[in-house]
Image (cartoon, helix red, strand yellow):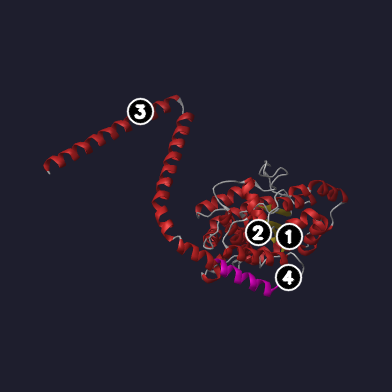
């Protein structure tokens, strides 16, 4: 649990650290033009794309280009491609998965978000986007890992930040991911990842104006739900949306998007994990209603986060032998993947080379093969000589 890791302030989720010299300039720019950055967070398959799409329809700007629509999301993702690529790069650098179930993963992404090089790169991109629009919406399931970094970048651009967290019953999230993403990850891992992500997303967004929105509410009565978000976060685009824009949203929202319906009875998961995940869902559900974002609610989330960290620690200890045994196999697979990537890169370089360059590269390959064979023969002779002398 992060609260027990004794992180510096700029590594704690939700914390923003700014120099004294930097603060006056930021405040002056923010007072001159009211810039807003709305971050749509939440687990994948929870309605984040629908919410971001609605915000785009009412007039918030989604930075371009966007991730193209596909069969898993035919109405589009409303995700800036740059943000997705940026988050993917940072996650790879710290070896964290999008749906990572490890509480420790938040420490690793917190360090990445605190690095000045990463903050500066995000600030530069965000400033360029604000040059064309005063209100932006950025959605990506990976964004929850880096909320603090986004807040810092927004402040440096003179912008206020708000967070919309989408929530959906975890059994439906797990089933939907299995249906549309497939892969080797099972229900237990996906449910643990959902629990970890949502508990720490709640913690990371406490210092920011925020709204929690049920996926079901958005599909059954989007008008009331979106109006509530606009009032809570003081979003002018929603509060003054034209009749035409409202009609466009009506055409955009499709209740048939609720294609996967599951309950706890459909999941085969450990009782302890289900208990914590269910309690987390109950608390998140309350947060979607007015007046429940209180210190008492925060305390309950803190208890759940501690309980989940304990449960995960026990699972790690129980599986320690398997983890230890998997280490060599993982290293072999990693080396093989690197060798394959290097070979592919070499072939691509050869294909793109000019004829003289290709001749040079062929000569190098031949010379390399000769050296390897000579070395192998020398080692063989040395081995035979050692056996003869023995």
Q: Earlier in the sequence, mark 2 or mark 4?
A: 2
| Residue at mark 2 to residue at mark 4: CA–CA distance | 25 Å
Which residue reaches farthest front?
Answer: 265
Residue placed furthest toward the left: 389
Q: Secondary structure at mark 4?
A: loop
- Asked whether residue 227 is drawn in magenta, I would say no
Q: Is residue 297 above or below residue 127?
A: below
Tell which circle, 1 or 3, labels the residue nearer the N-terminal end.
Answer: 1
- Residues tagged 4 and 3 counted as in contact (Cβ below 8 A): no
Q: Residues within 10 Å of mark 2 (few under 14, many from 20)?
A: few
The reply to whether residue 265 is visible in this rendering is yes
Tell me residue 204's x, y (percent). Answer: 62, 64
The alpha-carbon separation of the residues under discs 1 and 3 comes to: 63 Å
Say what secondary structure mark 3 lies in. Answer: helix
Say which residue label 1 marks. 213
Mark 4 or 3, nearer chain start: 4
In the image, the segment drawn in magenta is: 291-308
Q: Earlier in the sequence, mark 4 or mark 1?
A: 1
Q: Does residue 383 appear left or right of residue 61 in this picture?
A: left
Q: Which numbered mark, 4 or 3, is in the foreground of this view?
A: 4
Between 161 and 23, the one nearer to me in the picture: 161
> Which image quadrant is residue 292 in?
bottom right
- Residue, disc 4: 292
> According to the image, label 3 marks what residue?
363
């Amino acid at each position: 649990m992060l609260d027990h890791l004794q992180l510096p302030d700029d590594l704690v989720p939700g914390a923003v650290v700014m120099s004294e010299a930097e603060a006056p300039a930021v405040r002056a720019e923010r007072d001159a033009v009211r810039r807003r950055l709305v971050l749509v967070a939440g687990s994948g398959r929870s309605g984040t794309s629908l919410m971001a799409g609605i915000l785009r329809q009412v007039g918030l700007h989604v930075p371009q280009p966007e991730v193209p629509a596909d069969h898993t999301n035919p109405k589009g993702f409303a995700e800036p491609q740059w943000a997705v690529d940026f988050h993917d790069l940072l996650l790879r650098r710290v070896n964290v998965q999008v749906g990572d179930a490890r509480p420790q993963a938040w420490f690793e992404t917190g360090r990445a978000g605190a690095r000045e090089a990463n903050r500066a790169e995000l600030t530069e991109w965000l400033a360029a986007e604000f040059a064309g629009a005063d209100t932006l919406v950025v959605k990506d399931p990976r964004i929850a890992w880096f909320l603090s970094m986004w807040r810092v970048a927004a402040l440096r651009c003179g912008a206020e930040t708000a967070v919309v967290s989408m929530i959906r019953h975890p059994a439906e999230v797990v089933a939907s991911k299995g249906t549309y993403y497939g892969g080797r990850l099972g229900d237990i891992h996906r449910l643990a990842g959902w629990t970890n992500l949502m508990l720490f997303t709640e913690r990371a967004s406490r210092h920011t104006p925020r709204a929690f929105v049920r996926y079901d509410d958005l599909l059954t009565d989007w008008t009331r739900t979106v109006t509530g978000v606009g009032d809570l976060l003081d979003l002018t685009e929603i509060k003054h949306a034209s009749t035409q824009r409202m009609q466009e949203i009506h055409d955009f929202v499709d209740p048939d998007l609720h294609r996967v319906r599951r309950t706890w009875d459909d999941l085969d998961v450990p009782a302890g994990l289900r208990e914590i995940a269910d309690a987390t869902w109950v608390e998140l559900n309350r947060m979607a209603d007015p007046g429940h974002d209180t210190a008492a609610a925060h305390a309950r989330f803190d208890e759940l986060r501690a309980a989940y960290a304990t449960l995960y620690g026990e699972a790690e200890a129980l599986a320690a032998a398997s983890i230890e045994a998997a280490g060599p196999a993982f290293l072999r697979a990693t080396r093989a993947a690197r060798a394959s990537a290097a070979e592919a890169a070499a072939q691509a370089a050869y294909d793109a080379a000019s004829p003289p360059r290709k001749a040079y590269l062929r000569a190098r390959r031949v010379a390399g093969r000769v050296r390897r064979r000579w070395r192998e023969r020398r080692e063989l002779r040395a081995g035979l000589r050692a056996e003869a002398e023995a």
